[in-house]
Image (cartoon, rainbow, N blue to C red):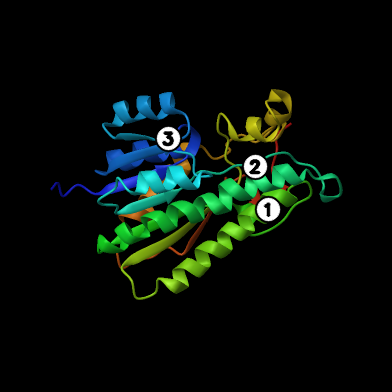
Amino acid sequence: MSDQKIAVVSGASSGIGAATARHLAAAGFHVHALARRTDRVEALAKEINGTAVTCDVTDDYAVAQYAATVDRVDLLVNNAGGAIGADPVASASVADWQAMYDVNVLGTLRLTKALLPALIASGAGTVVTVSSTAGLIVYEGGGGYAAAKHAQTALVETLRLELCGDPVRVVEIDPGMVKTDEFALNRFAGDATRAASVYAGVEHPLTADDIAACITWTATLPHHVNIDRLVVRPLAQAAQHKVHRVL
C-alpha cells in the first residue's frame, strides 16, 4: 500500500474546491476530487493525477456508496456549499433556505459521518470545514445563508469536543469576501450585474487560491497543532459591514 496521504475535497468542480485540490496535490496528497459535475472533476483529476468522484453531498445514498469504496482517508475538506438569494426574512423562500441548509450543513454532516471511521483509523486525520464569516455574524439579506453557516459552525465546534482524545484534528476556515467565478452568480440566479456589484470598487478581494493556501497550511502543520478557527478577509474588508471601495 502506498504511503501517500489521501485527501477528499468536496465541491471540487470549481472555485475554492478546485483550487484546494490543486494545492493539496502540489503538497503531496493524492486527492479525491468530489462534486456533482462529472466532466469538471474528471478534467481536474487528470490535471492533478488524482481521483474523480461524482457525488452529490445532499444525496444520502451517493455519499454512502462513495464511502464504501474508500480504504484510507487522511484529510477531509468539507467545501461543498453556497448561498441562494438575498431576500429579507419577511419574504424569504423556504425552499431556498432548505437547499442552503441541505448542502452547507447536512452535506457536511453526511460526508463527515461517512468518512470519520477512516479518518480515525488513519491515526492522524484532519477535518477542515469551509464555513464563512456569515457563520459568525449576520447581515441584512443574508438570513438564510447566515443561518446555515451558523449551524455549520456549531456542527464543527461540537465535533471537535466529541473527538477530543481521538487522533483527528477539526479545523474551521471562515472566509470573508472571496471573488470566484460562480459563488455570487449562483446566489443571484445568474444575474452577472448583481453579482459584480458585490465586489465593485474592491481592489483585491480574496481569491480561491488564497483560501486554498490557508486550507493547505492548516492541514500540513504538525499533527499536534490544531487551528480551531481561521477567519480570513481581504485587507479592504475590516468587518462584515465595513468594506473599503474605490469608486
- Residue located at (50% from left, 56% from top): 109
Instruction: Answer with the quarter of the image where residue 31 lies.
Output: top left
Residue where numbered disc 3 is placed: 18
Rendering coords of residue 4 (x, y %): 19, 47
Q: Is residue 233 visible?
A: no
Rendering coords of residue 207 (x, y %): 51, 37
Q: Which mark is residue 146?
A: 1
Residue 147 vs residue 54, the one in the foreground: 54
- Residue located at (79% from left, 49% from top): 140
Instruction: Answer with the quarter of the image where residue 74 lies.
Output: bottom left
Amino acid bearing label 2 = Ala
Provide the secondary structure element on which disc 1 rests. helix
Provide the secondary structure element on which disc 2 rests. loop
Provide the secondary structure element on which disc 3 rests. helix
Amino acid bearing label 1 = Ala
Residue where numbered disc 2 is placed: 83
Amino acid bearing label 3 = Ala
What separation in Å lies between label 2 and label 1 (alpha carbons)?
9 Å
| Above-or-below relation of 199 to 231 | above
Q: Residue furthest left?
A: 1
Which mark sits nearer the N-terminus, 3 or 2? 3
Quarter the C terminus occupies? top right
